[in-house]
Amino acid sequence: MSQKSVPPKAIPALPKMPRPALPPSLPALARPLAHLEIRKRDRFGEGHFGASRDGGRRRHMGLDLVALPGTPVTSPLDGTVTRLGWPYGNDPSYRYVEVTAEAGLVVRHFYVAPEIGLGRRVTAGETCLGTVQDLTRRYPDITNHLHFEMRQAADPACRDHRPRDARGHRRNLYRGYPVIDPTPLLFIPA
C-alpha cells in the first residue's frame, strides 16, 4: 500500500520585532575595599549575588564584601553622590551612600557611615565615601560587611531616584531599575 506524500505546509514568517535597546557597556569597577572577600555562610545567610533569602522567597540583590567596622570605603566609579539614606527606617543608626554614574549606573553602598556630602563628585578608587558600620548590634553573630548593590537607571539623566508625584508622594524608581550582578565587574579574572 502506497502512501501519498503530502507536501509540507509553509511555516508563516514571524513579524519582525524591534530589537531591545542594548544596555551601555558596564565598566570594570575600582575596588571599594582594599581586600575583596565575599561573605561566607553565617546564621543570616551568605553574601554572594542571588543567594537565597527568607527561606527561598527572595534572592539577594547585592554582594556582601567582608569588612571590619571602620574600614574605609572608596567609590568604585566616577559619578555623583545622589543619596545618603537609611536601609532600615526604624533604625537611623545604619546608613548607605548612593553614587550615580553618567551612564545611569546606580551603586548603593550599605552599612557605611557617610563622610561625604550629597551632590559631591567622586572619582573611582580615590574618593572615600565613609567607613563600614558594625552590624552585630542589629544582627548578633553576623559577619560584618559592606553590602554592594548595582542597578541601571531607565533614564541615564535621572539624578533623583525618588521624585514626588503630582500628589506630592515619593515614588521609588530605584526598586524598578534592572539589577546588575557586580561580581564579574569587581572580581575580574587575571
Image: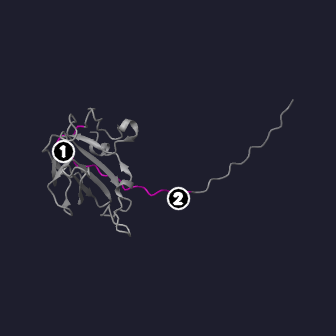
Between the C-alphas of marks 1 and 2, the distance is 41 Å
> Which residue is outermost to the front?
90
Q: Amino acid at mark 1?
A: Leu
Q: Residues within 10 Å of mark 1 (few under 14, many from 20)?
A: many
Q: Secondary structure at mark 2?
A: loop
Residue carrying label 2? 18
Q: Residues within 10 Å of mark 2 (few under 14, many from 20)?
A: few
Q: Main secondary structure of the magenta part?
A: loop
Horizontal side of residue 125 vs 173, given as left or right: left
Q: Is 25 colored magenta in this rendering?
A: yes
Question: x%, y% of residue 103?
Answer: 32, 60
Question: In the rendered structure, are the residues bearing label 1 and label 2 in contact, judged by CB atoms less than 8 Å apart?
Answer: no
Q: How is the image coloured?
A: one colour
Numbered circles on residues, count: 2
Q: Secondary structure at mark 1?
A: loop
Residue at x-position 33% and y-position 65%:
163
Question: x%, y% of residue 142?
Answer: 22, 36
Q: Amino acid at mark 2?
A: Pro
Question: x%, y% of residue 113?
Answer: 16, 51
Residue at x-position 68% and y-position 51%:
12
Identify the magenta region: 17-37
Residue carrying label 1? 33
> Which residue is outermost to the left?
70
Q: Is 18 colored magenta in this rendering?
A: yes
> Which residue is outermost to the right?
1
Horizontal side of residue 148 vs 154, given as left or right: left
Using the rendered view, name the quadrant where residue 143 is placed: top left
User: What is the quadrant of the C terminus in the image?
Assistant: top left
Q: Could one spot residue 126 in this view of the protein?
A: no
> Relative to residue 54, is residue 168 depicted above or below?
below
Q: Earlier in the sequence, mark 1 or mark 2?
A: 2
